[in-house]
Image (cartoon, rainbow, N blue to C red):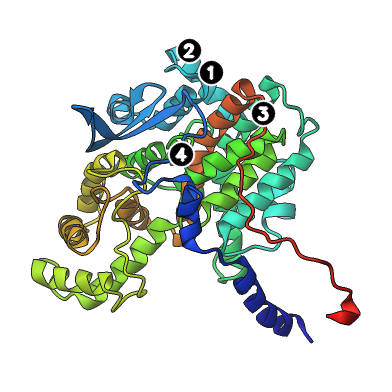
Amino acid sequence: MNMNEFTAEHAKKCQQVDTIDKDLYLKYGVKRGLRDLNGQGVLTGLTNISNVVAFKQEDGQRVPCDGQLWYRGYNVEDLIRGSGDSLFGFEETAYLLLFGELPSETEMENFKEVLALSRDLPTNFVRDVIMKAPSADIMNSMTKSVLTLASYDKDATVLELDNVLRQCMMLISVFSMLAVYAYHAYNHYDKDGSMYIHRPDPSLSTAENFLRMLRPDKEFNHLEAKVLEVALILHMEHGGGNNSTFTTRVVTSSGSDTYSAIAAALCSLKGPRHGGANLMVMKMMDDIRAHVKDYKDDEEIEYYLAKILNKETFDHKGLIYGMGHAVYSVSDPRERVLKSFVERLAVQKNREEDMGLYQRIEEIAPILIAKQRKMYKGVSPNIDFYSGFVYEMLGIPMELYTPLFAIARITGWSAHRIEELVSMEKIIRPAYKSLMVEREYVPRDQR
């Protein structure tokens, strides 16, 4: 019997022995996905890093409200507005998340200088690690690179705070390089494209360097870099309860090293239920464009969206991707902020017609979903609804959509790793109730 035959046969056994009756979760009070029946997350920790607000208290009642996202006590909308035309808003926000305060001019310059000096990889690392065994799965390539970087660090397992901070800042600096170089290697070896290994410019910001390293001519304009920077800031952090950040804290609590904790977070983020949502939005939008003739006809758009909801078309999952969020109800603050920048970029790229289609779907879909689904809270577009459209207009290949999420979120992961090391003294170990039935052992020749 070969491997494929064995696994095909025994997968049925796994299906049989590992299926748990859903009613038992209610019987034993188990919160599936660590969320209660109202969608409220189970409290598993405390943090000073960020806050996600979707409800407010009115007359003792929990009432849905416009979503808010706070970094270290600052509303993220104020942080983006305050950065103005500067292209170093990402770096300023990174300083805030790591150190709890907005930097002074001197602190900011020092931080930028250290990040620029850290934006370097070991000798021959690109050739020996990134270019070997390239893959369309850039997240896997990044994970491989992060784990391999540990081999170049003589203090890889040292948990002294200054050492962990050094490691985190280095990873924040090189994540763009790991992603872009991995893409170029894949594009060259697997797709017969040209390969560009552009060095980052120490005078440029994270967003600028990403575009510089990605594009053959290294050219970009101010609005392109600014819109990408805003998208990165909005993805940097989202509370300790999201899957990849919680993974970071779980691995950190075991006493493991920085490289292992961040690699685990990358593996979590790449899951389609977490970081890959904007890819599904883009595939859905391509399908809608193929079937909707008039982008200004609300009735035609509504008719086709209803077919998607009824599992009659697209991927037959019954989901309008980019709509709804596990936490937000009335609105996702990240979507609200990003949308205004998307509109400006759409004008520059002559994509107003596509923008109009997005806006109509944004208005029609929540009403359709509310009619057809029993919702414990409201539904509204989330940041994934527009982020893929932004990346497409910037000419960023789809293979880099989720890695861009990681390039942003590495800062939040780092802040939570440090907070876990400083504040917690116990390994995170939740309980599982066993449903196992004890059995007597039967010798093999009697089975």
Amino acid carrying label 3: it is Lys
List x then y, in percent, for residue 443: 89, 74
Mark whose residue sits in front, 3 or 2:
3
Query: What residue did someone put label 4 on?
Result: 42
Amino acid carrying label 1: it is Asn
N-terminal-most mark, 4 or 2: 4
Q: Residues within 10 Å of mark 4 (few under 14, many from 20)?
A: few
Picture residue at 24% right of the left edge, 42% below the top: 336
Callouts 1 and 2 close, C-beta under 8 Å: yes
Dot 3 lies on which element? loop
Callouts 4 and 3 close, C-beta under 8 Å: no
Q: CA distance from mark 4 to mark 3?
A: 18 Å
Dot 2 lies on which element? helix
N-terminal-most mark, 3 or 2: 2
Q: 301 left or right of 283?
A: left
Residue 110: mark? 1
List x then y, in percent, for residue 365: 20, 60
Q: CA distance from mark 1 to mark 2?
A: 6 Å
Query: What residue did someone put label 2 on?
Result: 106
